Image (tube, rainbow, N blue to C red):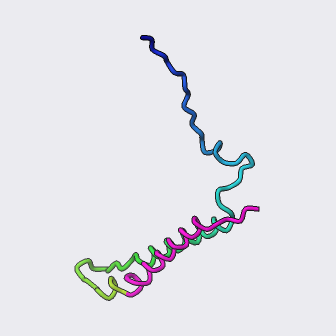
Amino acid sequence: MSQVKSNSKSTTVSKSQSSDKNGALLFDKTSYMLMGVCVALVAIGFLLMSGGKTPNPAEFHPETLYSTTRVTIAPMIILIGFGVGIFSIMRKTNEA
């Protein structure tokens, strides 16, 4: 019995080759702007959640730690930011 070697080359396509030849972007300008809004909203939400340092570590101030801003408003802003990000990725672009 004879063995046959196959010379099949596996082709890999780089990201630059898989995009259009004219250098078109994956999303349109509005989607990128919405993604920027998403990043800004998530960053603002995390900044609102941070803080609350007391000068004396032996003291505990529950009104500072469990404030409405940290417990309710900041997580809502973060979720809204993630929603904007999902919307910016999933929205249909106008192809002219």
Report if residue 95 lies within the magenta region.
yes
Q: Position of residue 49 (x, y in %)?
A: 41, 77
- Quarter of the image that includes the C terminus: bottom right
**Residue farthest along the front direction in this orientation:** 1
Q: Position of residue 10 (x, y in %)?
A: 54, 31
**Residue farthest along the right direction in this orientation:** 96
Name the residue rendered at 65%, 42% in the picture.
17
90 w.r.t. 10: above or below: below
For residue 33, what is the image quadrant?
bottom right
By secondary structure, the bulk of the magenta-drawn segment is best described as helix
Name the residue rendered at 22%, 79% in the picture.
58
**Residue farthest along the left direction in this orientation:** 58
Seen from the viewer's position, the closer of residues 91 and 8 is 8
Report if residue 78 lies within the magenta region.
yes
Q: Position of residue 12 (x, y in %)?
A: 57, 37
Name the residue rendered at 70%, 48% in the picture.
20
- Quarter of the image that includes the N terminus: top left
Name the residue rendered at 54%, 22% in the picture.
7
Q: Position of residue 84 (x, y in %)?
A: 55, 73
Seen from the viewer's position, the closer of residues 95 and 28 is 95
Answer left or right for 88 relative to 79.
Answer: right
Residue interval drawn in magenta: 68-96
65 w.r.t. 85: above or below: below
* Numbered marks: total: 0
29 w.r.t. 62: above or below: above
